Amino acid sequence: MGKIRVTLFLLIFINTIHGQLTDQGGFYGSTTILNSHILQEEREIQIYLPTAYGRTSKKYPVLYIVDAQRYFLNGVTFQQNLSWQEIVPEFIVVGIHTDAQHRRTLFYQESSKFIEFLEKELIPEIDSTYRTLDERIYFGWEMAASLGIQIFMEKPNMFQGFLLASPTHISKERLQGVSERLKNHTDRPAELYAVLGTVENWALDSMYSLDSLFKEHPIKNVQWKFNLSETENHYTTPLTTINEGLKLFFGDYGPIRFYSLDEFEAYGGIPKLKEHYRKRGEKYQVSEDIHADTKHYLLVQALNESNFEMFELFMLEFDGKKFMEDYYKQARWFDRFANYYLANDKLDETIETLNLGLQKFPDASILHFSMGNCLKAIGKIEKAKEYYSKAIQIAKANNEPVLETYISKLNKIN
């Protein structure tokens, strides 16, 4: 009886640990078994949900990973790393486990059967169980990559993105099918990103043929990029493919940055920027406001180019004071913008900006020092001394290297 109890305890303990590892919100995601009538077998499916999934009601794009036993965690890792800085949105990752022998049959000789499984069983199951957007991405390596090419030509509505690592078995039939689709055009947008190492000489000719088809029949809403890499090989291409492919597919998601005001004006200015973020918000179910990082980039660019007129326009358009109060996590930005106002003889705005900064960072010596400079400039010497003294007090307590500068400034007006 004692042994039975110990055995039951161990089983419960093991199941508990397994449940923690495959929890929906955990790093490993969850694993389920899908009984496929089309394939006449059970399929192990791995699912990872974004960390915010349970706290929101929004829908998410889905990345489907073939050969999940190898590459599922790569999809999860890149999702987490790239979404952290909003380079890509959070998305669901679905992994399809395969075995070494069976996959070769399903991805080539019986490829139509596997495509039917995706179309009629797996994707409907995922869409009915989880909150998904009509934004699906397919990842495949080797034979699974060329299967993706077949899906692109035969099922234009199934996936909008294809990440193809080291494609092999690109047959004449598949090339012909791609050619026909490109010649007949399509209203359905698609983006394809393929990576092949130069050392993979067995696949070079077929990939050159595929690449030439996309170049010969360009279509506006079908984007093709082929990366022939001198540094990757047959087993490392998946990492580059997933990372770079996701960034390309979600190229409209990350905050826009302009590296000159001329570039901003050529883009279309504020109206075009608002239109972009409105469409982005609708597509990904996020805020339709201009991204805070874009606002920051534009303000700094105007400052760097000494274009005070554009700086004021941006501050007015972005509700600048409120934006600064919410966005900036360092006192130096309030100081920098205040000094820009001061350099343009905008004393009221200078003081207002410094006061905003001091409310948020009351122990920032740099803001007290700059307030002293501003008050000195308008002749309020005694008040300026108070701020200089406060800056010195804070700098001494923190052993700041600017202490001597503060002391020298105060001594000059004593």
Image (spheres, helix red, strand yellow):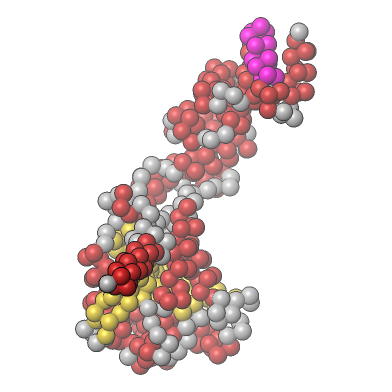
Q: Position of residue 296 (x, y in %)?
A: 52, 39
Q: Splitting the image into 4 quarters, where does residue 155 fall?
A: bottom left
Q: Position of residue 335 (x, y in %)?
A: 61, 28
Q: Please say whether residue 57 is one of the residues in the magenta stretch.
A: no
Q: Main secondary structure of the magenta part?
A: helix
Q: Nearer the viewer, residue 294 or 365?
A: 365
Task: Tally the numbered discs.
Answer: 0
Q: Is residue 155 left or right of residue 266?
A: left
Q: Is residue 303 left or right of residue 287?
A: right
Q: Looking at the image, which residue is at 60% across and 35% down?
A: 303
Q: Which residues are magenta?
A: 378-393
Q: Tell me if I can see residue 282 in this picture.
A: no
Q: Splitting the image into 4 quarters, where does residue 196 fall?
A: bottom right
Where 91 falls versus 237 (above or below)? above
Q: Position of residue 54 (x, y in %)?
A: 30, 52
Q: Nearer the viewer, residue 48 or 279?
A: 48
Q: Nearer the viewer, residue 155 or 56?
A: 56
Placement of the C terminus among the 4 image quadrants: top right
Where 35 falls versus 313 (above or below)? below
Placement of the N terminus among the 4 image quadrants: bottom left
Q: Looking at the image, which residue is at 43% across and 76% down?
A: 69
Q: Looking at the image, which residue is at 37% across and 61% down?
A: 20
Where 379 falls versus 304 (above or below)? above
Q: Nearer the viewer, residue 396 or 296?
A: 396
Q: Looking at the image, which residue is at 44% across and 64% down?
A: 76
Q: Tell me if I can see residue 287 in this picture.
A: yes
Q: Please say whether residue 379 is one of the residues in the magenta stretch.
A: yes
Q: Position of residue 143 (x, y in %)?
A: 44, 85
Q: Splitting the image into 4 quarters, where does residue 3 fall?
A: bottom left
